[in-house]
Amino acid sequence: MYGLLAEFDGPIELTAAAEKAYAAGFRHMDAYSPFPIEEVSGAIGFHRSKLPVIVLAGGLLGMLGGFALEYWVSVLEYPLNIAGRPLASWPAFIVPAYECTILAASLSAVVGMFALNGLPQPYHPLFNIMEFENASRDKFYLCLESTDEQFDPANTRKFLEDLRPNQVWEVPY
């Protein structure tokens, strides 16, 4: 079993259920809704993302790579002395290095987002529940995963039913 899925009618009920599940000790859970709900992110324990660090590292590497490429071409590989200017004229290197920074940061953001979200994901166990397609329309779901230390099928089902959801499903793999 992947876990237990509970359906709620609105964001307030979902937020309250997520807060109670977190307070009960559940840490491996996820919430699904037709629109983002910031309170639910905090309620399920999702606080920080590694994506800003990935984007910063990508931008810095892009800047260094762009500057190194310009230095290599202009100073080491094909030096041209034009009007007695220095070969390593760093002010002339700023704009292309900046553009390389933007390019590398944006590419690392896209790749990092896909990697951290586990995408592409053509199959997920929740797709086995036919009613789950309403998560993108008008229903709100909380899934408590079986990998959690607190998870016990019978006790977790009773816990979820005490939260007064519309329905609770067992999610097979």
Image (cartoon, rainbow, N blue to C red):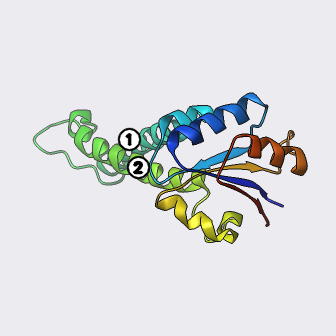
Residue 110 in which image quadrant: bottom left
Mark 2 residue type: Ala
Outermost left residue: 83
**Label 1 or label 2, whichever comes before in sequence order:** 1
* Mark closer to the observer (1, 2): 2
Q: Residues within 10 Å of mark 2 (few under 14, many from 20)?
A: many
Query: Alpha carbon of mark 1 to alpha carbon of mark 2: how far?
Result: 8 Å
Q: Residues within 10 Å of mark 1 (few under 14, many from 20)?
A: many
Residue 51 at x, y percent in the picture? 52, 41
The answer, for residue 43, to whether it is visible in the render is yes
Mark 1 residue type: Met
Q: Residue at x 14, y 45 (%)?
A: 82
In the picture of the structure, the residue carrying the numbered disc 1 is 63
The answer, for residue 121, to whether it is visible in the render is no
Contact? badges 1 and 2 (CB < 8 Å) = yes
In the picture of the structure, the residue carrying the numbered disc 2 is 104
- The residue closer to the viewer here, 121 or 67, is 121
Which structural element holds mark 1? helix
Which structural element holds mark 2? helix
